[in-house]
Image (cartoon, rainbow, N blue to C red):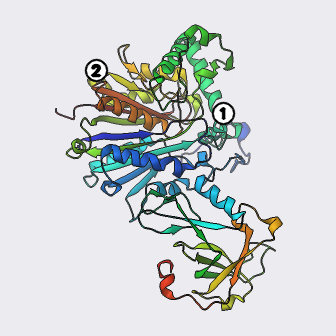
Amino acid sequence: MRDVAIVSFAQTKHERAAEGINEVEMLMPLLKEALDGAGITKDRVDFVCSGSSDYLAGQPFSFVMTLDAFGPWPPISESHVDMDGAWAVYESWVKMQGGKVDIALVYAYGKSSPGDIRRVLSRQLDPYYQQPLWPDSIALAALQARAGLDAGTFTMEQMAEVVSSSRRNAKANQFAQITGDADVAALLEQPEYLSPLRSHDCAPVSDGAAVVILAVDGVAQELSSRPAWIRGFDHRIEAHSLGVRDLTTSASTRLAGEKAGVANGPIDIAELHAPFSHQELILRDALALGDDVSVNPSGGALCANPVMAAGLVRMGEAATRISRGDGDRAVAHATSGPCLQQNLVCVLDAEKEGE
Amino acid sequence: MAEVTLPERLQGVEPVRSIRAPARISYNYTAGRASSRFLRSVADKKLFGQRCPACRKVYVPPRGCCPTDGLATEEEVELRDVGTITSFCIVNVPFMKNLMEIPYVGALIQLDNSDIPIMHLIQEISADQVRVGMRVEAVWVPDDEIGPTLESIKYFRPNGEDDAPYESYKDNV
């Protein structure tokens, strides 16, 4: 295996609606910031991979236009996933194993504001039995929360604690959309929004983007004084039909976590992509994270949720914390699909394999 | 395929071969800073492009960045509504129903002082007379119909100048 590290990260200040600017204008300054962060120019990049969804923009092949932000001439080696940018990191990592790519740049962006995100997300359901019913994304998450509460997997109080600590953590995050001190008792006094969820249990609607730069062993040390090495990487998916899944647990996260080797050492930091408060509880359980782990020090997706980029942001946030010495070993997680259908787990470490 | 044994009540029933599940989602499209400024200026019958600080090319319509260099294009260059045909095609299929009489010509037109051609219609000349290098000018819709859209230009027509020298448009052929 070739060792690969995250050496640079940039993200937008996420907001409810990035009005007046299009996706290219949103990305351009970030690409420069990420390249500057690694101290390189774009001609050093061997491979570009992006993550986005045409359903958000409402435009076919919108991701092709966004390449203008990078400047794909002379012709570049490039790929795109119709998934969160975390999966674009996975594709890049696999590609880098082939030996031809030493530096890869991954970007992801999502403007949720142009369409009705709750309706848009229903388009990822199966087209015969579920899509025609237009179940919206919050209703499906509420279904999952209800199942978990009824099964005794978690409690309303625990859900409110997740919200409270996420918002408190986000106070130190200049890119977050929602921050503040929210007392658990006060949160529980809020009215239900879509039973059993209160509005604070749901991620905000966000526009935003993120860029990550990856480099292989020998190059990474040149671009970062403390690279965040990828020590394990796996993603797993569950069945399309909600009815055949146990929504109170996340079998795919558990398996991806095992394959990525989460338990092979102590975890200092976990950045979990949980767009709903109860999902963080399910993920912590699936990854067997102890109480000593700092979970979502950035505030997580509950404080900014740029769809298609929020998972990549988790990887960037975890890597940044390793690089600046907040911890030595971190887990970054990304999810896709309704009720945590597909999950990606990446273990990042200050030391590379064998050190 | 494995044999499927249907319960008795479904035997002999016509199988479902397709379903219809129409979907409709509305979006608020954001043109972006550069395109918005350009479209607003079209509504004032003015055209402009943006120059890349690195390769010096002038892009029209401007998109706020140079797709070659990935750099922001901030310098704006005012353009006349006069240019040169760099390529064209003769349309013999009535795509536009009754709007256009066939045959008609769709052309790539490089506006003077710009480096990227725009696409538009050529009229007031028989289709078989149109040629690459021909000089053309915009014909705008009446003032009360002008808006922030390239449809504010009805079409381009020959302006009577001599054909442009090949050197002036060779990069777009």
Query: At numbered mark 2, what does the secondary structure look like: helix, strand or loop?
Result: loop
Checking the image for residue A266, the label placed there is 2
Q: Respond whether the residues carrying marks 1 and 2 are from the same subunit.
A: yes
Q: Position of residue A178 (x, y in %)?
A: 55, 26
Disc 1 or 2, which lies upstream in sequence? 1
Q: Nearer the viewer, residue A19 or A44?
A: A19
Tell me, yes or no, whether the two marked residues, 1 and 2, touch with CB atoms within 8 Å.
no
Residue that label 1 marks: A136
- Which corner quadrant of the image does residue A323 belong to? top left
- The residue depicted at 37 percent of the width and 30 percent of the height is A318
For disc 2, the chain is A
Q: Is residue B25 left or right of residue B57?
A: right
Q: Residue flagged by tag 2: what amino acid is it?
A: Pro
- Mark 1–mark 2 Cα distance, whole angstroms, equals 38 Å
Q: Position of residue B57 (x, y in %)?
A: 47, 69
In the image, residue A164 sits, relative to residue A108, either above or below, namely above
Q: Residue flagged by tag 1: what amino acid is it?
A: Asp
- The residue depicted at 16 percent of the width and 32 percent of the height is A355
- Which corner quadrant of the image does residue B160 belong to? bottom right
Q: Nearer the viewer, residue B32 or A228?
A: B32
In the image, residue B9 sits, relative to residue B48, either above or below, namely above
Q: Position of residue A181 (x, y in %)?
A: 53, 15
